[in-house]
Image: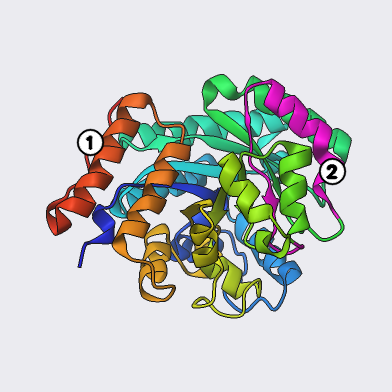
Amino acid sequence: MRDLRLLPKAHLHLHLEAGMRPGTLSELAAQKGLQVPEVGAYGDFSAFSAVYDLATRVLCTRADWERLAEEMMVDAAAEGCVYLEPAFWAARYRDTLGEDRDVWAVVLEIFGAAAARHRIGIGFIVAVDRVHDSPADAQRTAELAVTLKPWGVVGLGLHNDEIGHPPGDFAQAFAIARAGGLRSVPHAGELDCGQTVRDAVDLLGAVRVAHGVRAGEVPGLLERLAADGICLDVCPTSNRVLGVVPDTAGHPLRELLAAGVRCTLNADDPLLFSTTLLGEYEVARTVIGLDDATLARIARVSVEESRLPVGARHAALAGIVRWLTEDETALPVPLAG
């Protein structure tokens, strides 16, 4: 059996703070006298969000952020990940790090340096919080995101509970981002119906949709996604834990792939779902039942959708071919430049 650790892959749907190791969460919480949130049994999305908020409170100092960045890069390298694209909502840290631009300056510097040390590509998604941000807030965030493009920001995302916060409310913000050369990568089709996926494409100009697994509810939408090359960044374990799907074996990933939709595999919030990027590939193989050719196809799409430099992208794609054709003898290719 081919070793999935040796399959070059990109991680495109990852909420930055949730890349933290469980042990790091416990240690940082103890240092600061904070309660360690209980991970796993959420019941609903609001309970999950509350735990996420608790987990982020342990990141108080520059040293905390440096530890998070270093450990994330070490873990990514061990999983065969050649590129990370974490999403981040800066407003959460205004009390500790300053205005959003100041927060982003810290994050971009620390994570960029850690990625360079470990020779892992990195791009950043600036998040709009559909619950806490007004449309005007979102527009200001989009304007900031465009100015940060030279320092590694590659897209604008739309996060948090979809129910009652439709994509159309944020259309102007995403128009600003697209005009500034950023990709539109909103969440849709997770907690709300498949129509939100269509709206994300039609109203926000989405080129990738985070989740999107309910797109099959809308007649003809899968065919359109396939024809237009819209990519879905899928997270099977997250979907099971939050009740989006009743069980992993019946996850719609197989249906999406059969329809020709471009899909990637991702961990979403590894800390809070007790999973990893590698774990999602293992689940796709052993529980969903995908063969290695399909897993290689998914990895190829993830690299194609990344913002790796051309040379590094070609090297990763060649590594995927070798993994599939040379079995366990394939090794990840160095990804400098």
Q: Which residue in the protein does label 1 denote? A: 334
**Colouring style:** rainbow
Q: Residue at x 69, y 27 (%)?
A: 178
Q: Which mark is residue 168?
A: 2
Could you say where residue 67 lies in the image, as x and y percent from the top left?
Answer: 43, 47
Q: Position of residue 265 (x, y in %)?
A: 47, 56
Magenta-colored span: 165-193
Name the residue nearer the viewer: 332 or 15: 332
- For residue 105, which quarter of the picture? top right
Numbered tag placed on residue 21 in the rendering: none
Question: Of 221 and 185, which appears nearest the observer?
Answer: 221
Circle 2/circle 1 CB separation < 8 Å: no
Q: Can you say which quadrant of the picture contains the C terminus? A: top left
Tell me if residue 149 comes above or below residue 241 in the rendering.
Answer: above
Cα gap from disc 2 to disc 1, whole angstroms: 42 Å
Q: Is residue 157 left or right of residue 59?
A: right
Is residue 260 shown left or right of residue 96? Answer: left
137 sits to left or right of 145: right
Badge 2 density bin: few <14, some 14–19, many ≥20, Cα 10 Å: some
At label 1, the amino acid type is Pro
312 sits left or right of 44 in the view: left
Residue at image x 46%, y 37%?
306
Find numbered disc 2 in the image and state the secondary structure of the residue it sits on: helix
In front: 226, or 6? Answer: 226
Helix, strand or loop at mark 1? loop
Q: Position of residue 3 (x, y in %)?
A: 23, 61
Q: Amino acid at mark 2?
A: Gly
